[in-house]
Image: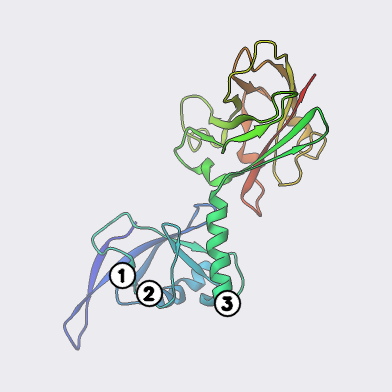
Amino acid sequence: SISAAGRKSASSAIVVPRLRVQVASALTGAVLIPEASAESNWTVRRFKLSVARALRTEAAEQHMLLDGRLLGDSELISCILSTSSGENTVHALTFLRSPPTDGARSAAAAAAASALQPRVEVASVDGLTSSVRWRVDARILKRTDKQLTSPTFELNLGPGLERIPFKFSIFASGSGSFVKSEGRGYMQLKCLQDLPKAVGDYSITAWVCPRVGEAAAGAEGAAESACTQEHCFARSAAVRLAIREELDFAAAVDRRSRTFEVAIDIAHH
């Protein structure tokens, strides 16, 4: 949050608004600096210099964003932040350790944007099984959202049903939010197309794992949470993936990428 105070210059008697700025991680949403002071006539680089020690990151290695936009070093604080609003937030993207060249700026912006995008990968394991991996940004677990739904993806359910649309969803436990449930909840897989009544059951193996690429039912940390169940999407479009009564998504977060992966293998008989 930001609010404006004032500082009077002794020589010119001009009041320079002073802002209180909260700095948060652009990847995790965690607050890194609860309150930092900035004068409205500062540039972004001057602000970076002032918070370098608190962030433990040199100014040249910092990449500041506001509402997803990468800020230039020469931009004025007064042009970026409102001196009257108390709700603006400057996000600090500090994990890149390179000078802010044009290439690094583009990489920082791309990293920040891609971290927010849910990713679904679908692969055919064999002629009968499809493998789905949904990489989830762990910041959702610190928010007041009650559910998160993946982009639509297509599965091959057999002859004549080669491109059937589906979506994944994760829900917070109970009737609360992810932050209230401390990152616990459950998973759901939903078919978005009516299927012929003759369609039979499908075998679905589901699990949650920390690292991208670790998604295998026998992988370390995944075997304990894996479950296999039968379901007919012709009878019911959605199925709750009952790994257990409650899943601890927060415990599956990979600390380096700040993501976790929801995974299923689905096979038709």
> How far apart in space, not on screen, are marks 2 and 1 (Cα)?
7 Å
> How far apart in space, not on screen, are marks 3 and 1 (Cα)?
24 Å
Question: The N terminus appears in which quarter of the rendering?
Answer: bottom left
User: Label 1 near label 2: C-beta < 8 Å?
Assistant: yes
**Residue annotated with mark 1:** 79
Q: Between 3 and 243, which is closer to the camera in this rendering?
A: 243
**Residue annotated with mark 3:** 99
Is residue 178 visible in the rendered image? The answer is yes
Give the crowd class for mark 1: few <14, some 14-19, many >=20 residues within 10 Å.
few
Is residue 94 visible in the rendered image? The answer is no
**Residue annotated with mark 2:** 75
Residue type, numbered disc 2: Glu
* Residue 153 in the image: above or below residue 94: above
Residue type, numbered disc 3: Pro
Q: Position of residue 269 (x, y in %)?
A: 80, 18
Which residue is rendered at x = 50% and y = 24% of the image?
174
Residue type, numbered disc 1: Cys
* Residue 9 in the image: above or below residue 136: below
Which residue is rendered at x = 79% and y = 37% of the image?
216
Which residue is rendered at x = 64% and y = 53% of the image?
257
Choose top left, top right, bottom left or bottom right for residue 243. Answer: top right
Judged left or right of residue 229, residue 237 is left
Tag 3 secondary structure? loop
Q: Between 72 and 158, which is closer to the camera in this rendering?
A: 158
* Residue 102 in the image: above or below residue 194: below
Q: Position of residue 30 (x, y in %)?
A: 50, 53
